[in-house]
Amino acid sequence: MRKTNRNADADEAEIDLTPMLDVVFIMLIFFIVVASFLKEAGIEMNRPESNQNPPESDATSIVVTITGDDQIWMENRRIDIRAVRANIARLLAADPEQSFTVKTEAGATAGTLLEVGDAAREAGVKQVNWPAEDKK
C-alpha cells in the first residue's frame, strides 16, 4: 500500500498570481496615462475682460437680469420665464436692431440662463451678449 502525502498535493495546486498582478498594474498605468489626454466635452464661452468699457449701445439694449434665486427681471419688473419671449418680441418690434444683454448675479443657475437665451433666440434676437463679471 502506498502512502500519499496530502501536503505535496496542496503545493502542486498553487497558482502563482504574480504575472497577473504585473499585467493589472501595467493596464492601470496605461489607463491613467490615456485618461490625461482625453478632453472633456463642455460649452466654451468667450467672455470679455471686465476692464473693457461696456458698449455704447447699452442704453438702447434689451437687458434681462437673472438674480441669485433665479428670478428674472426685465424693465424694472419681475417676469415669468414663459413671458420672456413675448416681452423681447414686443421690444424688438419697436426697434429690430436693439442688442440683447443677459446679466446674471452670483447663484443663478445655468438652466435659467439657457432658458432665457433660448427664449431670446426664438423671439428673433441675433446675438446674445453676456457681460463680464464686475470684480469688486
Image: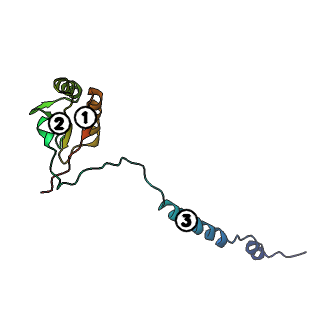
Q: Nearer the viewer, residue 12 or 97?
A: 97
Residue 28: mark in rendering = 3
Mark 2 crowd level (few <14, some 14–19, many ≥20, 10 Å Cα): many
Q: For mark 2, what is the residue?
A: 64
Q: Position of residue 102 (x, y in %)?
A: 20, 40
Q: Residue at x 27, y 35 (%)?
A: 117
Q: Nearer the viewer, residue 17 or 64?
A: 64
* Residue 118 as seen in the image, left or right of residue 53: right
* Distance between mark 1 and mark 2 Cα atoms: 8 Å
Among the 4 quarters of the image, the one containing residue 83: top left
* Looking at the image, residue 26 lies above or below residue 52: below
- Mark closer to the chain start, 1 or 2: 2
* Residue 113 as seen in the image, left or right of residue 14: left
Which mark's residue is nearer the viewer, 3 or 2?
2
Q: Are marks 1 and 2 in contact (CB under 8 Å)?
A: yes
Q: Residue furthest right?
A: 1
* Distance between mark 3 and mark 2 Cα atoms: 50 Å
Among the 4 quarters of the image, the one containing residue 73: top left
